[in-house]
Amino acid sequence: MSRLLASTLALLLVTGAARAQDAPDASPECPVSNLLGGGMIGNICWTCIFPVRLMGVDMFSSSLLESGGVDAAGFSLSSRPEPPPQSADDPGCYCQEDGRLPRIGMTIGMWQPAEVYETTLIPGCSSFLGGTNLGITDPLYLGTAGVPTEDLEQQSFTHIHTYSYPVVGLMELFTKCQRGYVDIDALYFSEVDPTWNDPFIAMYGNPMSTFGASVPAQAACIPDAISSAVGAPIDELFWCGGTWTSTLAPYTGYNHNMGTMQFTSAAALRLLAMNHVRGINKRMTGDDAACAPTYDPTLNRSDYRWQVAWPNAESSRNHGSGEALLTWAGARWIPAVADMPMYLLWRWTDCCVPIVGSQN
């Protein structure tokens, strides 16, 4: 580890502790997380990086146990990380980019932490940023956990913020396969997105949502829910949400499903799907994406995995998109103290490591 990295981590630890003690805008309604402090090390499942696929061959397989048991802390075990079905399997790669020398190399793929998804019922509250209220919208624009009813009139609604969180790159690990963001930064705040709280505007913004919200489309999601429950989503049914929600359409913060872990997970997955439509998140999986990220308006859920990063982190494992809550969600939030979780998004990344040609 370089001297610069050590200094950076020390600074993060000190500033994170300072925020926790005397953050000026912190309040009981907006608790302080540790993801910019010690949680950057202690809250992350580092073994979830594996397996690594090198030249089409899986190496350094995951040491995590299969589903069905409990870990050392007594939590249920979720599915084990595996390469997505469409991950790169060609041993070599050739990349030709405009204005640069072509490069010939070998393919490598792995799971990497990419972004933090922060959910909150308090508009502008950012536990990630030390319990700070950002003041970016009307404070009365509150979210709600909803109340179960037979007619589904009562819904949950959550605000959501995303931050880039490329901790593998920040620690100078796997430097030849760094793609996407290189620093921690704010990416999205739902409070300033007019489509997040209005299903009609969201429908016009993405006409495919009309199909995804139809009865036939939702009926087609039944087999996906069964498969996703064990960590194997059916990517062809891109509008489905596994066991978290009957459909991802429309892309808003409203959900009929109940329970904190369920409706916050569904909201995070919907935002990820929306970002694929908008081209904010691009596909980094597959032989055709080894040279550069590829725009793909449909969400391949098997390319991503999720980890509860705070308050009770899944520090020794993560789970698939739409996976059954019974395998991972127990005791992951603290009622009345830290009752809105943050999720760490893991993304499978295929890249072309140059042997001949440009090294950048």
Image (cartoon, helix red, strand yellow):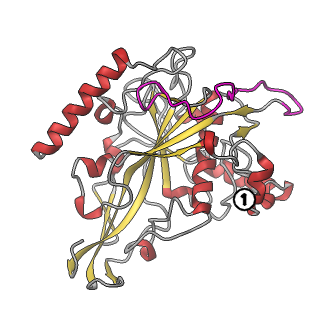
* Residue situated furthest right in the rendering: 151
Residue 36 visible (yes or no): yes
In the displayed structure, does residue 339 sit left or right of residue 292?
A: right
Foreground: 129 or 321? 129
Please determine whether, in this image, residue 322 is positioned above or below residue 144. Answer: below
**Residue at image point 57% right, 35% down:** 136
Q: In the orientation shown, which residue stands out farthest toward the left?
A: 3
Label 1 crowd bin: few (<14), some (14–19), many (20+), radius 10 Å: some
Q: Where, quadrant-wise, is the C terminus in this rendering? A: bottom left
Q: Quadrant of the N terminus?
A: top left
x 64%, y 48%: residue: 270
Q: Is residue 82 visible?
A: no
User: Which three-letter amino acid code belongs to the residue tagged 1?
Assistant: Gly
Please give the range of residues in magenta: 127-153
Q: Is residue 138 magenta?
A: yes
Residue 264 location, quadrant: top right
Q: Secondary structure at mark 1?
A: helix
Asked if residue 15 is among those painted magenta in the image, a careful observer would answer: no
Q: Is residue 175 or residue 88 the one in the foreground?
A: 175
Q: Does residue 215 sit above or below 10 in this rendering? A: below
- Report the predominant secondary structure element of the magenta stretch: loop
Q: How many marks?
A: 1
Report the front residue among 267 and 189: 189
Point 39% across, 19% down: residue: 23
Tell me the residue at 36%/15% (across/down).
22
Percent x, y for residue 328?
52, 34
Is 153 positioned to the left or the right of 68 in the image?
right
Q: Position of residue 252 (x, y in %)?
A: 70, 45
List x then y, in percent, for residue 162: 50, 43
Q: Report which residue position mark 1 lands on.
A: 205
Whole-percent x and y of residue 181? 37, 55
